[in-house]
Image (cartoon, rainbow, N blue to C red):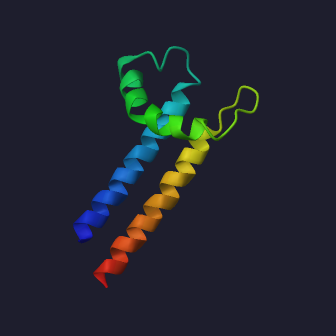
Amino acid sequence: MVMLISLVENAITLYTLLIFAWVLMSWFPNARESSIGQMIGRLVEPYIDIFRQFVPQIGMIDLSPLVALLVIRFAGNGLIYLLTSLLL
């Protein structure tokens, strides 16, 4: 069970880092059009698109990645809490 908790923590951390990388790539010209950028985009954009429906843009600033990060961290912490409580 400890291995499962570790796996969930690592998966959440990895996906969080992918979201950060995707956001940072928007600051550099043509970074999202590279092969790595396209691969990260295919992994991250379906999740971000869920929040784009509910979070409006403020001018040119898209806050949906921030909301997506908060949700994945809260949900991940809740899942880890549930898994650890099952151990006791």
Where is residue 49? Give x, y as percent.
52, 34
Indicate the position of residue 25 as horizontal and vertical percent values: 52, 26
Location of the N terminus by quadrant is: bottom left
Q: Is residue 83 left or right of residue 17?
A: left
> Along the horizontal axis of the image, is 72 left or right of 83?
right
The image shows residue 41 at horizontal and vertical percentages of 43, 28
Q: Quadrant of the C terminus?
A: bottom left
Q: Is residue 27 above or below residue 64?
A: above
Residue at horizontal 44 percent and vertical 15 percent from the top = 33
Tell how many labels: 0
Answer above or below: position of 3 versus 17.
Answer: below
- Between 31 and 48, the residue placed more toward the observer is 48
Q: Position of residue 45 (x, y in %)?
A: 46, 32
Q: Is residue 25 left or right of residue 12?
A: right
Q: Residue furthest right?
A: 59
**Residue found at the far front of this picture:** 53
Q: Residue at x 25, y 64 (%)?
A: 4
Relative to 37, is 84 above or below? below
